[in-house]
Amino acid sequence: MSLATGASRRRLRLGGLALLAAVALAAVLVVQFDVPLERILTVGFLNRTLMLASPIALAAVGGLYAEKSGVFNIGLEGFMIFGAITAAATLSLVGASSQLHVWLAIVVAVGVSLVLTAGYAVLLIRYKADQIVAGLAVWFIGLGFAPFLASLLWGTVRSPGLASMNRYSVPYLSELPVVGSILFNQSPLVVLTLAVVIAAWVVLYRTRYGYWVQAAGENPTALDTAGIDVNRVRYATVLFSGAMAGLGGAVLLAHAGTFIGTGDTMVDGRGWIAIVAYLFGNYNPIGAALAALLFGGLEGLQVQFQTVDIAVSGRLMGLLPYVGVIVVLTVWGKTRMPSSVGEPYESEE
Amino acid sequence: MSDDPGRTREALDRVAARLLDASVYERVGIAVGSTGLALLIGLVVVAAAGHNPLLFAQQLVVGSVGSTGAFTRTLRFTTLFILAGVAVAVAFRAGVFNIGVQGQLVVGGIACVLSILWLAPFVPNGPVGGAGLTLVGLFAAVVAGGLYAALPGVLKAYYGANEIITTIMLNFIAIGIVGWAVDGPLRPDDARSVRTEYLPEGVGLPSLVFSDPNFSILGLGLALAVVGVVAVGMTRTSFGYDMVTSGYQASAATFSGVDPQRTIVATMTLSGMVAGLVGAVFAIMIQGYFIDPSGIGTYGFDAIAVSLLAANNPVGVVPASLLFGALESSGSHVQIHSDVPVQLIDGIVGIVVLFVAAPELFRMLAKRTGLGGEKR
């Protein structure tokens, strides 16, 4: 149809323009303001990007599983907030700060997210709640109850300094240039994220279970005819998405070491960015992780600009990922979503 | 999600239709039931946190209607919620998810304050000049809010960018940029806190009936007038008809000659214009200057609950706003007089939204418990 081709042509033109603008801006910065590019694109920047991208990538992988199976989990942002506050509360309550306790806090956060997601899944699947409104509600509940819990525990919405996850360091190997610092002197949570992404890709595209997930979203009737309980598959993926979002929130906290409950809390839109990450990654876990890297990189630029003394307000630089999301959505608006997303499925029997 | 604008519309349809198909009694029952149950859960949480739930419930009542001061404060918040609720309802009714009312009200508010501050030196002092500046400020807010909402409208209509996410991103961006400006170029040298210059004297809405300097019956009147205009516009004009039909059945609207893309942009613009007005009323009637927007109440988000409770009907927004105005007002009371963290109220609002999203659950609950309120 002319309408569709017109839209895609417009998008293509806009995409080209956006790319041109980005390149031009970079060129102006380098030439006009003598910005040392090699001091911005450092190994440290790459490392920070990986750490910043991890929570987004985890939530994105969870969200894409749910959506692949036909349920739009728009509550990712809320579950990330629950993950972060649970991990912080656990760390604070156990009172110790060894690395083992950080891991314990992460496990507890995933467990609590699972329980909360179970209730949410029942509302969505059994009671056919509106997926968009219910997802927004999860966000609002998180925005209210996380600072509430923080105030109960610490008297303010901000936690005191808690334990954070240390990087592991492999002797000798970590001294290798570039690779050494990225592979052998890294946060274990980045490695965990990588493992989750790869496992999610394998399961989705190389196992029978992955095909069930895809079928539940594309053609639930066929799956039902084949004798597989569609809603059971959907329960599993929604639970997984909540657990991954909770894990993402916990990872965010474990890297930061402090819970911040002011404004939109420390999660600050990362759950929404995760949704865009998997759309941009075309529902492919690896694509979603790469998109998360892009948004993590945009976030990390703030620190890089500070280190080379470019006087741009940190608050303004912090807005880059949000601008990036809008550009990506505008240029990449054409993602084809699974055909049965948002439709509750009822078996004939 | 993004390749099919009809999909979000369908999703919204289901919620709206469920509520719209219900009789008025049932709708009111669901709204009251959702709020009541959410408040009950809030009280359980209060008890679980080791505080006295009965005392807390009493503080909610005292803090909202317990004194003239509390009641005026309730009306003050009600005014904001009516306008913000209408802004959301306009969009939701047309099947467009404008989650960006918070950002649009921030942009409207700062535009209002800036236009007044810039024009003030050229306008004579006194009541006439003040009234003129007030009008200019309201107008600037409407224009700025409308433009800021038109952007995600265009991105949705012509580029297929999902408006839920773009409007949420634009919230972050508006709050970030305005927050930076208020703390930087717009902050006067002698300001101890993060704020703009004070609005000149004479700008504002006179208190008239109540003695509260932060509430004017004129503000409430303005909000009710907007409700009237929007309600009539939606039911009695062809543009309103096009809008509501697009929301109800996009394909039917297209076949009957409605340009779906222009309707989306127009709807978002209209919604943003009303949202901008919220910011102006906040700046002129309540604050008297503009602050870091991350410190402004989340009226734009709570308005989503207001609109959903009212089944996205602009007239229904009024009683729903009264309820939320009372909640917000008692929040101010709780903050001072109770050890229970005030954020609980935001959480309760979230639970209300969750219940409204799942009326099925609600009907079942009503049936099981034998409460007749939700059945017709």
Image (cartoon, coloured by chain):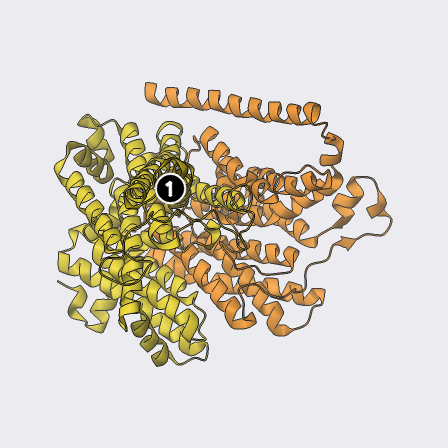
Chain colours: A orange, B yellow
Indicate the chain on which mark 1 is placed. B
Name the residue rendered at 44%, 53% in the picture.
A238
Q: Is residue A281 visible?
A: no
Name the residue rendered at 40%, 63% in the picture.
B347
Dot 1 surroundings within 10 Å: few (below 14), some, or many (20 or more)? many
> Relative to residue A338, is residue B201 depicted above or below?
below
> Residue B297 at x, y = what percent?
41, 56
Q: Nearer the viewer, residue A252 or B52?
A: B52
Number of numbered discs overlaid on the protein picture: 1
Q: Nearer the viewer, residue A190 or B155?
A: B155
Q: Quadrant of residue A342?
A: top left
> Relative to residue B48, is residue A16 depicted above or below?
above
Q: Quadrant of residue A297?
A: top right
> Residue A67 at x, y = what percent?
43, 45
Q: Quadrant of the C terminus of chain B?
A: bottom left
In the shown orientation, is residue B51 left or right of residue B217? right
Q: Nearer the viewer, residue A211 or B9?
A: B9
Task: Looking at this view, name the residue that lies furthest to the right.
Answer: A172
In the shown orientation, is residue B136 left or right of residue A23? left
Q: Secondary structure at mark 1?
A: helix
Q: Quadrant of the N terminus of chain B?
A: top left
> Residue B41 at x, y = what percent?
35, 71
Q: Is residue B152 visible?
A: yes
Q: Nearer the viewer, residue A28 or B185?
A: B185
| Amino acid residing under circle 1 | Cys
> Residue A180 at x, y = what percent?
80, 44
> Relative to residue A254, is residue A311 depicted above or below?
above
Q: Which residue is mark 1?
A: B112
